[in-house]
Structure formats: structure tokens, C-alpha cells
């Protein structure tokens, strides 16, 4: 017996679901953050567009880390991390933290401490958090954190990423 379901199962898809999924999510613009932590005495971190607020009371957030990332092994329960929300003017920081680097590479980047976590000094907002849970998710892990401190930082337009590149916000922020 032949029908739509049988015929579809016999024909290979025109493109893979994985590639279509990636293309679909490129259309979703996201704010750009840098997740930072101490590795020995050195500042280390990575660029993330997956940072999400998940609870206001208690304040919690999550982000994803690739299992291939050199930051993967540093994401353990109890680790203190900083999340810095980048402005349009901080594209260079996004690029710097998006690449694999040697230890000590970030020593020249202005940073400070917030609640025991390293954060980038001139970010639009800074959040200090502690990793409380890690959940495997395909080729990534989802890192759940409890927020210890947060600072709104300076005013400005957020750095956005979508369609495989940086985007400009067309309007000034309200407030």
C-alpha cells in the first residue's frame, strides 16, 4: 500500500533537519554576552548568545556551552561566573572571547570583580552567579546558575547577533 507517509519515507529529504534547524535559528537575533571565570589567576571566558533569565525570585539564569569549547571543563557546580552584556561598541570583545586563546590572553581586558566573579568593566550590565546545575543537551550542556549580584552598568545599545553576523539596533533604548 502506498500513500503520502510511505512515499515521503522513501524519498531522502532535500536538506538535513540539522542544517534547516541551524538556518532557522540564525534568524533569531540575540543579545551578545561574555561569560567569564577565573582559570588560575587568569581571566578566561567565551562569547554567548544563549544567556537567558529563568527566574526573578530567586534570580537565576542559564546559558549553553559546547562540549567542544575549551571552557567546557570549567563549568562545574560551585564555579563562580560573570555575565557581561555587551554594547554595540564592544564588538571587538565579542570577537576576542569567541576564539580559542592561550592562557593569559585576556590580561589586557579591563575587568573587575562582582560578588566574587570576574566581569568586564565597561559592559552594559554585569551579573555574578554560581553554577548550580549542569544538564547534558546534545552537543552542548545547559548551565543553570543562581545570581549573587547584578549591576545595570552604563546606558547604551546592546550588541545583537543574527543571520550569522552582528546587527545594529535601530532605536535608542527606552528609559
Image (tube, helix red, strand yellow):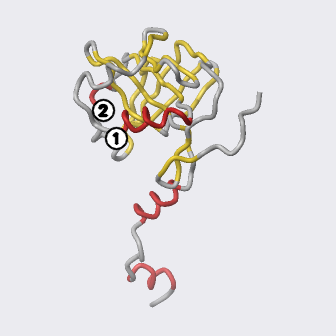
- Which dot marks residue 72? 2
Residue 43: horizontal and vertical position, in percent? 33, 19
Name the residue nearer the viewer: 59 or 171.
171
- Number of numbered labels in the structure image: 2
Numbered tag placed on residue 116 in the rendering: none
Q: Residue at x 47, y 53 (%)?
A: 164
Earlier-in-chain disc, 1 versus 2: 1
Is residue 57 rendered to the left or right of residue 10?
Answer: right
Describe residue 51's horizontal placement relative to residue 17 as left or right. right
Identify the residue shown where x is 39% and y is 21%. 109
Q: In the rendered image, which quarter contains the N terminus?
A: bottom left
Q: With 170 as the anchor, is 118 left or right in this view?
A: left
- Front residue of this view, candidates 138 and 98: 98
Q: Quadrant of the C terminus?
A: top right
Q: Residue at x 50, y 87 (%)?
A: 3
Q: Position of residue 63 (x, y in %)?
A: 46, 34
Tag 1–tag 2 contact (CB < 8 Å): yes
Answer left or right for 2 relative to 46.
Answer: right
Residue 99, quarter of the rendered image: top left
**Residue holding disc 1:** 66
Which one is nearer the viewer's eye here, 120 or 129? 120
Q: Is residue 64 above or below residue 131?
A: below
Amino acid at each position: 500500500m502506498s500513500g503520502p507517509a510511505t512515499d515521503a519515507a522513501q524519498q531522502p529529504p532535500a536538506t538535513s533537519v540539522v542544517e534547516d534547524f541551524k538556518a532557522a535559528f540564525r534568524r533569531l537575533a540575540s543579545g551578545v554576552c561574555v561569560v567569564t571565570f577565573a582559570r588560575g589567576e587568569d581571566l578566561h571566558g567565551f562569547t554567548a548568545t544563549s544567556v537567558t533569565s529563568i527566574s526573578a525570585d530567586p534570580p537565576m539564569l542559564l546559558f549553553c556551552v559546547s562540549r567542544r569549547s575549551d571552557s567546557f571543563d570549567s563549568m562545574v557546580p560551585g564555579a563562580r561566573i560573570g555575565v557581561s552584556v555587551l554594547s554595540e561598541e564592544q564588538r571587538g570583545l565579542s570577537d576576542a572571547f569567541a576564539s580559542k586563546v592561550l592562557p593569559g590572553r585576556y590580561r589586557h581586558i579591563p575587568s573587575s570583580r562582582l560578588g566574587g566573579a570576574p566581569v568586564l568593566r565597561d559592559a552594559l550590565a554585569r551579573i555574578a552567579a554560581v553554577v548550580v546545575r549542569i544538564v547534558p543537551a546534545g552537543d552542548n550542556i545547559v548551565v543553570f546558575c543562581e545570581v549573587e549580584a547584578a549591576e545595570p552598568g552604563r546606558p547604551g545599545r546592546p550588541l545583537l547577533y543574527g543571520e550569522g553576523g552582528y546587527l545594529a539596533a535601530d532605536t535608542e533604548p527606552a528609559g
